[in-house]
Amino acid sequence: MAVYLFCKECKSTYSVTLKKCPKCDSPTPSRNKVFRVSVMVNGKRVTRTIPNSIERAQQVEAKIKGELIDDEYFDRREKIPTLGEIWTDYHESHKATGKAWAQDKSRYETVLKDRFEKKPLDEISPFDVNRLMVDMKNTTSKRKTAYTPKSIKNAHELLSRIFNYAINVKSYEGPNPCKKAKPKPVHNEVTNVLEDKQIKNLLKVLDAHEDKPTANLIKLLLFTGMRRGEAFNLTWKRVDLKARWIYLEETKGGKPETLPLNELASQVLKDQEDLKTELEKLKAEKDDPKTEKVDLVFPNSKGKKLMDIKRKWAKIKEEAGIPASFRLHDLRHTFASLLANSGVVDLYVIQNLLTHKSPKMTQRYAHLVDEARKRGSRTLEGIILKAQESTDEDGTTSQLKGA
């Protein structure tokens, strides 16, 4: 038999019938065994390491032996890249899109790199993916904090995307092991929504705020439901105030989208345009050598892309009496909830306004639409009851047919 147990301690091989390694006396593990396949035909020896399954090891042995006998064997490992090699290509190609590549890099380096970087893709099994998720659940991060279900899901999604990238660019023709090893569903969606009084207080604070660009940015998020990153990346060439459209180059869904501008959003952008013109005029009058036209709608003080407004947002929330837990992203939830609760906007329209790729993401607002429909039904009920109680000219009470 050409299938042996592989000792992780001394790197030697020994019979699968033994209960410990004869070289270093390490006990044979009851689980997570590693098998070494060794086949030699006509003086040519081929070895492979197979994790976990002796049945799989025996299948690999038979396949290699048959190919060697038929002189059809070639070393597939030479053509299959490691996860680290694919990651380099994947990261560079996605870095240019601006899509959360920094977060991907952090997740790869802290969770996936040590475990999978040097492994060929065909040696990463569903068992390995499951083991990754179990280990994350039972350990802590480098910051000494527990991995949340969302963190585990994010790591799984990144690994899956790397595999899909390798398959799409034809670097790998095997299966994606993440499809057979999936994390448990995460039910921690937070949907904080401002009440009418809170919206009133927020707008009052923003109207009086000394930092007009920041105030305008926050208003635009509330009035359009845009994502924060979309507003940070927005350029004037993508804004059509005359036709009242915003053209988004890149969205979370991965394709260009258009957003209609209502009167409130249009006024915010007109105000921001006036501020931009005024600033450029002041710089020109001072003969400022750094004077240049900035195409970003909401640049930072140096005219570069804005990265965050956490401190300013925290102060604004405090002044408006809004809980500290209310996130900037929750303005998007507030926008969607107001529309859903209006009774005149259905989920399909809300999905398009939020540029959701799938209606599944919009379902969190379904109960609000249902409540609005119930209110509409109750309105009809009131109309009918009023009609039933009305009196005809002859003094008799009318009854609606079929009532």
Image: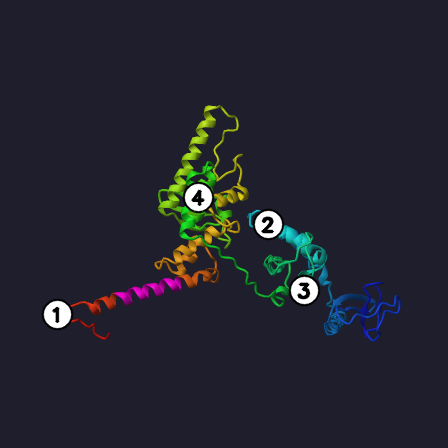
Q: Say what amino acid the circle numbered 2 marks.
A: Trp
Where is mark 4, residue-wise? 238
Q: How far apart are marks 1 and 2 (CA)?
A: 76 Å
User: Magenta: predominant secondary structure element?
Assistant: helix
Upstream in the sequence, badge 1 or badge 3? 3
Q: Which of 235 and 392 is in front in this view?
A: 392
Residue 227 lies left or right of residue 62; in this view the side is left
Question: Residue at 21% of width from left, 70% of height from top?
Answer: 388
Question: Percent position (x, y) of residue 374?
Answer: 35, 65
- Which quarter of the rendered picture does the C terminus lie within? bottom left
Asked if residue 176 can be seen in this view, the reply is: no
Upstream in the sequence, badge 2 or badge 3? 2
Question: Residue at 50% of width from left, 45% of height from top?
Answer: 318
Q: Residues within 10 Å of mark 1 (few under 14, many from 20)?
A: few
Q: Which mark is residue 134?
A: 3
- Which quarter of the rendered picture does the N terminus lie within? bottom right
Q: Helix, strand, or loop for circle 4?
A: helix
Q: Which mark is residue 395?
A: 1
Q: Distance between the residues labelled 4 and 3?
A: 45 Å
Upstream in the sequence, badge 1 or badge 2? 2
Where is mark 2, residue-wise? 101
Q: Say what amino acid the circle numbered 4 marks.
A: Arg
Residue 381 lies left or right of residue 236; in this view the side is left
Q: Residue 146 carries which label?
A: none
Upstream in the sequence, badge 2 or badge 4? 2
Q: Helix, strand, or loop for circle 3?
A: helix
Above or below, comparing residue 15 to residue 339 in the picture: below
Q: How far apart are marks 2 and 3 (CA)?
A: 25 Å
